[in-house]
């Protein structure tokens, strides 16, 4: 799926600005942004619920706006469209079976049994967590190429969440689906995503591959005798926290040369620590990420 120069405004309020994005096969992308950043609008545009004011969204070079048959390639249940409430799970299953030619009924029934869903229950009678499980089961059983998941694990207890994540990853390993997922729980996202998009005021401010950060970069805790930040830190590092003489610094391109320059400053201590999505969010908020964007091929 490729999005080129997409803009969208609603009631004269600009919601999305110049969105350029390629989602390649088998990729799990975390979409991170504050409430009102444009995440829901982006999902609705990508699934053809909203028509962009400008730009295009294509799958295999076919525009989804002029090829309605492409809808079977993506799955998204809008939280604000409460059309499921009045129906039983069995009826909803028949709706989705009709909409998705590759719908896997056997897998659907298997997952309903695994997660103890009563197929005759009405959707509105389910708890928040069970609704989340049911929607994930529908998404997996649909065999859609692109799954757009908005806070999919909200309301699930830790054990069920772990089991459901495993089901999703196993399904992706077999079918090569792509997932765009939002979550306010960054620790949760960090365990499953390959790539993170930061949406700020309707714009993708950063597009970061986590593997690049982990292989090229290094997070360090440092302390120096003088209450002064060394030039090597200012030049090559991005400061996450500063407490008196102790600094927590991320170096996007860490090397032996930088390590030696740090040692030349005679630090009181220097310790390697794990870089997290929380750290990445701090850098994004401060607009100090220097990792390059990676171009992808559809």
Image: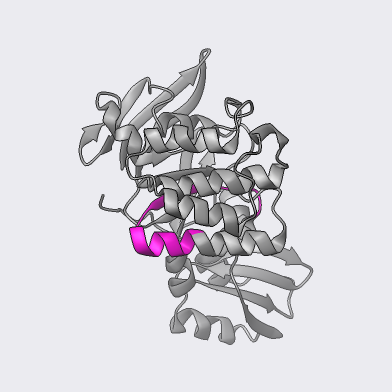
Compare residues 32 and 177 and report the one nearer the observer. 177
Q: Is residue 275 magenta?
A: no
Residue at 60% over, 29% down: 87
Task: Locate residue 240, reporting x and y percent.
Answer: 65, 62
26 horizontally vs 193: left or right:
left
**Is residue 43 shown above or below 285?**
above
Q: Quadrant of the N terminus?
A: top left
Residue at 62% over, 45% down: 132
Q: Which residues are magenta?
A: 168-185
Residue 112 visible from this viewpoint: yes
The quarter of the picture where residue 57 lies is: top left
Compare residues 100 and 188 and report the one nearer the observer. 100
208 horizontally vs 1: left or right:
right
Task: Locate residue 295, reporting x and y percent.
Answer: 30, 53
Compare residues 287 and 165 and report the one nearer the observer. 165
Seen from this angle, which residue lies furthest top?
A: 11
Compare residues 82 and 40 and report the one nearer the observer. 82
Seen from this angle, which residue lies furthest right?
A: 244
Task: Locate residue 253, reporting x and y percent.
Answer: 45, 70
Seen from this angle, which residue lies furthest left?
A: 61
Residue at 71% over, 42% down: 128
The quarter of the picture where residue 74 lies is: top left
**Is residue 73 shown above or below 253?**
above
Q: How is the image coloured?
A: one colour
**Is residue 105 shown above or below 84?**
below
76 horizontally vs 63: left or right:
right
Task: Locate residue 68, reporting x and y percent.
Answer: 29, 26
């Amino acid at each position: 799926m490729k999005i080129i120069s997409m803009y969208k405004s609603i009631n004269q309020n600009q919601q999305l600005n110049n969105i350029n994005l390629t989602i390649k096969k088998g990729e799990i992308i975390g979409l991170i942004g504050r409430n009102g950043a444009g995440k829901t609008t982006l999902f609705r545009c990508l699934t053809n619920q909203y028509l962009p004011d400008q730009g295009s969204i294509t799958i295999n070079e076919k525009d989804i706006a002029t090829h309605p048959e492409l809808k079977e390639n993506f799955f998204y249940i809008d939280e604000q469209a409460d059309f499921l409430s009045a129906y039983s799970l069995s009826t909803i299953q028949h709706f989705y079976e009709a909409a998705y030619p590759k719908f896997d009924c056997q897998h659907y029934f298997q997952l309903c049994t695994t997660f103890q869903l009563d197929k005759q229950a009405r959707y509105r009678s389910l708890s928040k967590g069970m609704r989340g499980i049911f929607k994930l089961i529908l998404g997996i059983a649909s065999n859609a190429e692109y799954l757009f998941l908005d806070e999919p694990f909200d309301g699930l207890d830790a054990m069920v969440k772990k089991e459901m994540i495993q089901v999703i990853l196993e399904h992706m390993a077999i079918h090569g689906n792509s997932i765009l997922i939002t979550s306010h729980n960054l620790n949760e996202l960090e365990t499953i995503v390959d790539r993170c998009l930061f949406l700020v005021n309707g714009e993708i401010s950063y597009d970061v591959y986590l593997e690049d950060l982990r292989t090229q970069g290094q997070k360090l805790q440092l302390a120096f005798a003088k209450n002064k930040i060394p030039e090597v830190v200012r030049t090559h590092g991005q400061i996450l926290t500063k407490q008196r003489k102790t600094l927590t610094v991320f170096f996007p391109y860490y090397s032996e040369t930088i390590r030696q320059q740090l040692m030349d400053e005679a630090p009181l201590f220097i310790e390697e620590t794990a870089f997290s999505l929380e750290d990445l969010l701090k850098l994004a908020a401060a607009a100090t990420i220097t990792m390059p964007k990676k171009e992808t091929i559809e």
